[in-house]
Image (tube, rainbow, N blue to C red):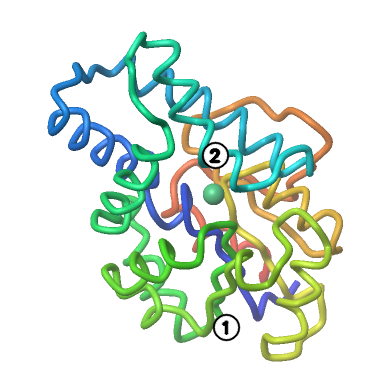
Amino acid sequence: MKISTILFDADGTLWDFDASAKRSIETIFNRRGYQFTDEVFDRYEKINKGLWERYERGEMPRDRVLTERFDMLFAELGINAEGAAFEDEFRTELENCPIWMDGAQELLTELRPHFKIYIVTNGVSSTQHKRIALTGLDRCVDDIFISDEIGAQKPHPAFFDHVFAHIEPCPKEEILLVGDSLSADILGANRSGIRSCWFNPAHQPLTGEARPDHEIHTLRELNGLIHSLES
Ligand SMILES: [Mg+2]
C-alpha cells in the first residue's frame, strides 16, 4: 500500500507538550511563591485532560476549558488566586518554551524527501504560531492546519474536509495520520476514512470507540512501519 501523505498531530506527538506545560507552570509557581511539586502537576494534568475531553465531545466551549482549569486546580490546592490571570501568564510561558519530542526532528528530516507532510493541530492560534516560529516546525513540513483558524476541531469531519481540500490532492488511501489522542486524532481519522497510527508512548490501554490501524510507542518506529506498509 502506497503512502504519499502524512498528517502529524503537534502537541504530544511532535512536541512534548507535557514537558513544556510542566516547565511553564513550575516557572510561574516559583515566581508567585507557590509550592510546586510533581503531584501538583499530576493534578493539573488530570483536570486539564478531563476538560479537553469535554471540549472534544462538544460539551464545553474552548474558552471555558482555559478559564476553568486553573480555577479548579487552585480550589483543590487551597490557593487563593484567579485562574484566568494565571492562564494568561501560562500562555505566555508556554509560547516561549516549546520542546521537541525525542526523535521528532530527525524523523521529519528523514521523511520529508519522500512524503508530503502536514501538521493538523487543535489549539489556540496565537500560541501555536509562536511555538511554530521558535521550533522552526514550519520549515520541516509542507503546511500547518490549526483548528482555531479553521473553525472546527479534530475529530470533527469538518476539520478534515478543510485539510483534504487544501493539501496536494491524493487518494485517501495514501494518507496516514499520526497522533497521540484517541479521541481527537484516531477517531477523526476513522470518521474521515483515512488510515491512522496511534503514537502511544505511555502504553495506554485502547479505550473508547476510536480504532487505530497501527500503533507505535516511539517516533523512531514510524519509518519502519511505513516501509512495512509499502512493501
Ligand atoms: Mg496531541
Q: Residue at x 29, y 54 (%)?
A: 92
- Residue 50 drawn at (x, y percent): 61, 28
**Quadrant of the rendering where the N terminus is positioned:** bottom right
Going from the N terminus, do you reach mark 1 or mark 2 first? 1
Q: Looking at this view, is 163 or 61 the one in front?
A: 61
Mark 2: give few (<14), some (14-19) or many (20+) Cα within 10 Å: many
Q: Which residue is mark 2?
A: 200
- Residue 226 drawn at (x, y percent): 59, 65
The amino acid pointed to by label 1 is Lys
Q: Looking at this view, is 143 or 95 the one in front?
A: 95
Total labels: the figure holds 2
Classify mark 2: helix, strand or loop. Answer: loop
Q: Kindly indicate the quadrant of the structure image that contains residue 188.
A: bottom right
- Up the image or down, 50 lies above or below 194; here it is above
Q: Kindly indicate the quadrant of the structure image that contains residue 156.
A: bottom right
Please tell me the numbered disc located at residue 126: none
Residue lying furthest bottom: 168
Q: Residue at x 76, y 69 (%)?
A: 160
Please tell me the numbered disc located at residue 116: 1
**Quadrant of the rendering where the C terminus is positioned:** bottom right
Mark 2 sits near ligand 1, with its Cβ under 8 Å away: no
Q: Residue at x 37, y 60 (%)?
A: 104
Q: Looking at this view, is 115 or 52 the one in front?
A: 52
Left of 186 or right of it: where is 157? right
Q: Looking at this view, is 123 or 198 the one in front?
A: 123
- Up the image or down, 53 lies above or below 179; here it is above
- Residue 64 drawn at (x, y percent): 61, 40
Q: Residue at x 39, y 46 (%)?
A: 17
Left of 101 or right of it: where is 207? right
The amino acid pointed to by label 2 is Asn
- Up the image or down, 29 lies above or below 227; here it is above
